[in-house]
Image: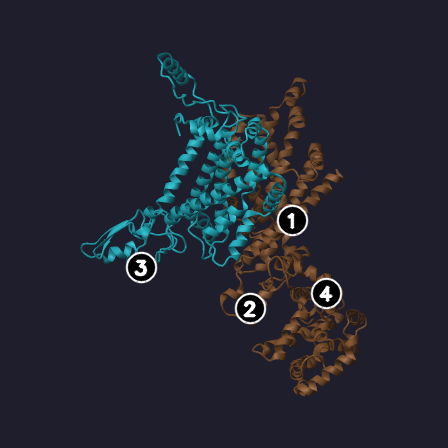
């Protein structure tokens, strides 16, 4: 049994990967902001946030701080048409760029060296070392940066920064803070990482202030910030870092090979989805994961209750219909269920809402929503149950049981129904997607604030992040449900698990 | 659908391969037309004619369908709704069916939308008619999109609106009739595509096996896990200008999985048969074995899946439009009309008429689908039960 369970669970992984690929293709349907015409920095930033600057599935040349610096320096040094953009880029890359610029400064011809050194002046000002004005002369700037690198090269190591940030978090002082200011963006990886490990208000204030100073953006927390505000700010920083990490970190050796796969639109999207970091809502700036966690219980409750209710009714109705095949109960229930089967869930829900006027209480609305949803699946499930029971009733072992002189109820319950339940169990798993879709409808009709309700608001507000998160969550939930129903099937029927184990892991289709 | 279908030997050939046809071989070319020979041939022919009609699965299926009163009723309802869809422009349009305007005769301007009549509708043409001009209006002179001024929420049978108007003054009859067109275009189109994909991929998966099978199995599982309604909602929200085609393709490209599963199972079943072994032994190429001996077994499931597929596509389309009501991109659709009714509690006609049309379509499609499934099920006897819900 354990082997069967393990095998089935493992087989869900390639399925989830394939699902993720499909969902990724869906994300590519969203329009590219660049096609709307007006270019410029905000559009570039919007494109980056959705990784539209990256190739889809494979990145032959992943960009990192080194390649970005090289490109920017080339523009600045040659003084070509893009030298202003190059200088801006060097300013943005900041301290992280220094280990890749300063050692090569010597090798440049004097005039180019001067232009690069001057372009770096705003960085020196941000680091609190020198006024940018005083570095506007090329020879002064070159002199300053040469000395700087001779003195400070040893500070620019990852382990050094890590230790500095750790000490700042543990017993922060202004002096340690100014040390980190002098590292500028070079310290960002450690700063952002430390934000999610500490809960201390003062430390968070220092961390966010440092990060904001270096990056020139992002929220700064006050020491007395509420937990919700802290969570939101940290999520914002992590989101930004997730998009911009390669601006400030170099990719070496194996990292570079891995980056060929991870530094792609699909890789980024998948990594974000797998880690549960689903971005922030475009409507209210809340982290999607928090929102999802708050809304999901409503939807799951509605689904679970509807599932239970429809099962509790469908099994007896379907089984009795088949047991009394062709009799009055069978004909009547079949006819009613047939019409119910063809009726859309939203019609049932709308009819229920209209006929029951007093639905102001949340509990009552929930009950009505469950009833509407259950009515739809009741029809499907009981029809399956009836067909399965009909199959079983005609078989020899049932006749044998009758012939043995067993009472009819015993034959019906023990011999027939037990076997007839199995197909319904698997089919119930397949019914999950329909149930989830139905939950969206009833939530909207009865005004329950679940995932479906929120999704429709997200559609109105063009909240792409939420939409993608929702469809991903649905797919994961359904896959989990399918695995669960297969496992249940394996418990009920030993033949199934033997077959799966024998066939070297092809799950029963 | 009543009575025996004419005997058509070719029809059996495509369906029934389990029972290899022994049916009428063409008479061998008589080499020496002798009197005795012709007598033998003639008597053989008579015997053939006298013999009971050769039973193929198609004939059995048609016989069963013809006997099924509910299936006949369903087919009738479907035929009526399809007529509505086809002649939607004649039944409800703001352009005339035919007219003479400025000395030019226009035939069916409601369909052709000639540029010369842009900006004109029946009411205005009536008002501005000059001697010599004439206008033949359609049954209801309102289009599904054109709101009538100051006629919001008119009750049925008032002011020339047989089924009333909605909150924007759009004629409900026109919206129901044109909604039928939307429903059938989406339903038929999407299920045609999904049947094609399902048969091809399911057939290949079963026939080729190995890596192809594994790949298709993964794709099937992956797509099964995504709720259709949610997917369609999300796709329509992401695409800049969603149209009916967006909906159609989204459903068609994701909902072929169930059919592929069925077809694969049928193919695997058929591959075990002796006639397949025989065909291979005779040197038939794999494509020929697949096309002539294996795939025909999958036609039954494909037909049934198409019938239920149309129903589920219509259902999804209605549900999506119901939820997306108010979005500027929606076509005239039953679901949208009912969604509108949610906002106006008193206007029962907004619920009842589109709701009835939708329910009739779904019930009829399910009746036909059920009947087709029973009729094509070889396990049921030649007079098997066709109770709904079986």
Q: Nearer the viewer, mark 4 or mark 1?
A: 4
Residue that label 3 marks: B119
Separation (CA) of disc 2 from disc 4: 30 Å
Q: Is residue A452 above or below residue A335?
A: below
Separation (CA) of disc 3 from disc 4: 67 Å
Residue located farthest toward the left when viewing the structure as drawn:
B131
At mark 2, the secondary structure is helix
Residue that label 2 marks: A43
Position in image of residue A93 (x %, y %): 67, 73
Residue that label 1 marks: A16
Q: Which chain is brown?
A: A
How packed mark 4 is, by other alpha carbons closer than 10 Å (few <14, some 14-19, many 20 or more), is: few
Identify the mark at residue A350; answer none if there is no mark: none
Identify the mark at residue A252; answer none if there is no mark: 4
| Chain letter for the residue marked with disc 4 in the picture | A
Residue that appears at 43% across and 52% down: B331
């Amino acid at each position: 049994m354990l082997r069967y369970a393990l095998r089935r669970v493992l087989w869900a992984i390639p399925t989830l990967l394939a699902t993720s690929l499909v969902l990724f293709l869906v994300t590519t349907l969203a329009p590219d902001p660049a096609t709307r015409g007006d270019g410029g920095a905000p559009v570039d930033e919007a494109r980056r946030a959705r990784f539209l600057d990256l190739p889809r599935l494979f990145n032959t040349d992943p960009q990192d701080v080194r390649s970005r610096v090289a490109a920017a320096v080339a523009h600045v040094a040659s003084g070509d048409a893009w030298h202003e953009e190059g200088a801006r880029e060097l300013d943005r890359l900041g301290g992280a760029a220094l280990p890749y610029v300063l050692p090569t400064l010597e090798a440049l011809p004097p005039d180019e060296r001067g232009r690069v050194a001057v372009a770096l002046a705003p960085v020196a000002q941000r680091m609190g070392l020198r006024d940018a004005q005083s570095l506007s002369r090329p020879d002064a700037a070159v002199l300053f940066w040469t000395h700087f690198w001779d003195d400070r090269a040893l500070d620019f190591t990852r382990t050094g920064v890590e230790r500095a940030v750790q000490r700042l978090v543990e017993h922060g002082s202004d002096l340690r803070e100014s040390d980190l200011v002098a590292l500028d963006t070079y310290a960002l990886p450690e700063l952002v990482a430390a934000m999610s490990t500490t809960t201390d208000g003062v430390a968070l204030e220092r961390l966010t202030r440092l990060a904001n100073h270096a990056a020139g953006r992002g929220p700064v927390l006050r020491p007395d910030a509420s937990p919700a505000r802290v969570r939101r700010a940290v999520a914002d920083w992590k989101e930004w870092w997730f998009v911009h990490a390669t601006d400030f970190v170099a990719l070496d050796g194996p990292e570079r090979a891995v980056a060929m796969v991870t530094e792609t639109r699909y890789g980024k999207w998948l990594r974000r989805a797998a880690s549960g970091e689903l971005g922030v809502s475009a409507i209210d700036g809340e982290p999607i994961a928090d929102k999802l966690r708050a809304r999901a219980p409503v939807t799951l409750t509605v689904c679970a209750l509807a599932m239970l209710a429809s099962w509790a009714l469908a099994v007896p109705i379907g089984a009795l219909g088949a047991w009394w095949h062709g009799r009055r109960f069978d004909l009547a229930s079949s006819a009613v269920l047939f019409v119910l089967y063809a009726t859309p869930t939203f019609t049932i829900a709308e009819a229920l809402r209209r006929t029951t006027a007093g639905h102001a209480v949340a509990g009552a609305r929930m009950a009505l929503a469950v009833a509407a949803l259950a009515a739809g699946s009741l029809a499907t499930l009981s029809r399956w149950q009836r067909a399965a029971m009909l199959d079983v009733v005609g078989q020899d072992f049932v006749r044998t049981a009758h012939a043995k002189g067993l009472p009819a109820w015993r034959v019906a319950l023990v011999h027939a129904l037990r076997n007839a339940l199995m197909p319904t169990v698997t089919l119930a798993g397949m019914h999950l997607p329909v149930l989830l879709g139905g939950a969206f409808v009833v939530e909207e009709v009865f005004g329950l604030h679940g995932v479906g309700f929120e999704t429709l608001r997200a559609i109105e507000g063009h909240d792409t992040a939420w939409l993608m998160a929702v469809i991903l969550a649905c797919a994961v939930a359904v896959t989990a449900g399918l695995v669960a129903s297969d496992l249940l099937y394996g418990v009920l029927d030993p033949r199934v698990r033997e077959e799966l184990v024998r066939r070297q892991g092809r799950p029963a289709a | 659908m009543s009575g025996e279908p004419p005997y058509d030997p070719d029809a059996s050939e495509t369906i029934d391969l389990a029972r290899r046809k022994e049916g009428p071989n063409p008479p061998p070319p008589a080499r020496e037309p002798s009197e005795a020979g012709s007598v033998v041939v003639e008597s053989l022919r008579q015997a053939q004619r006298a013999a009971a009609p050769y039973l193929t699965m198609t004939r059995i299926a048609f016989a069963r369908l013809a006997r099924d009163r509910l299936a006949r009723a369903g087919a009738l309802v479907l035929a009526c709704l399809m007529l509505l869809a086809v002649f939607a422009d004649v039944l409800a349009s703001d352009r005339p069916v035919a007219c003479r305007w400025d000395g030019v005769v226009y035939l069916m301007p409601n369909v052709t939308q000639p540029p010369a009549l842009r900006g004109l509708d029946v009411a205005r043409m009536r008002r501005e008619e000059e001697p010599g001009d004439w206008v033949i209006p359609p049954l209801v002179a309102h289009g599904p999109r054109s709101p009538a001024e100051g006629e919001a929420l008119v009750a049925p049978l008032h002011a020339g609106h047989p089924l009333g108007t909605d909150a924007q003054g759009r004629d409900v009859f026109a919206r129901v009739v044109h909604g039928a067109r939307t429903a059938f275009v989406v339903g038929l189109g999407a299920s045609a595509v999904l049947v094609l994909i399902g048969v091809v991929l399911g057939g290949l998966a079963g026939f080729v096996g190995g890596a192809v099978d594994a790949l298709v199995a993964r794709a099937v599982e992956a797509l099964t896990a995504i709720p259709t309604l949610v997917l369609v909602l999300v796709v329509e929200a992401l695409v800049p200008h969603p149209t009916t085609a967006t909906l159609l393709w989204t459903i068609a490209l994701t909902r072929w999985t169930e059919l592929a599963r069925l077809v694969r199972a049928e193919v695997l079943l058929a591959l075990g048969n002796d006639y397949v072994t025989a065909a291979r032994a005779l040197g038939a190429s794999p494509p020929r074995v697949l096309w002539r001996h294996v795939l025909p077994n999958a036609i039954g499931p494909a037909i049934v899946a198409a019938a239920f597929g149309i129903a589920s596509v219509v259902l999804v389309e209605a549900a999506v439009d119901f939820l997306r009501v108010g979005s500027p991109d929606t076509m005239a659709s039953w679901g949208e009309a009912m969604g509108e009714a949610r906002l106006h509690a008193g206007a029962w006609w907004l619920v009842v008429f589109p709701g009835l049309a939708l329910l009739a379509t779904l019930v009829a499609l399910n009746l036909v689908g059920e009947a087709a499934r029973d009729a094509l099920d070889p396990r049921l006897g030649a007079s098997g039960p066709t109770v709904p819900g079986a």
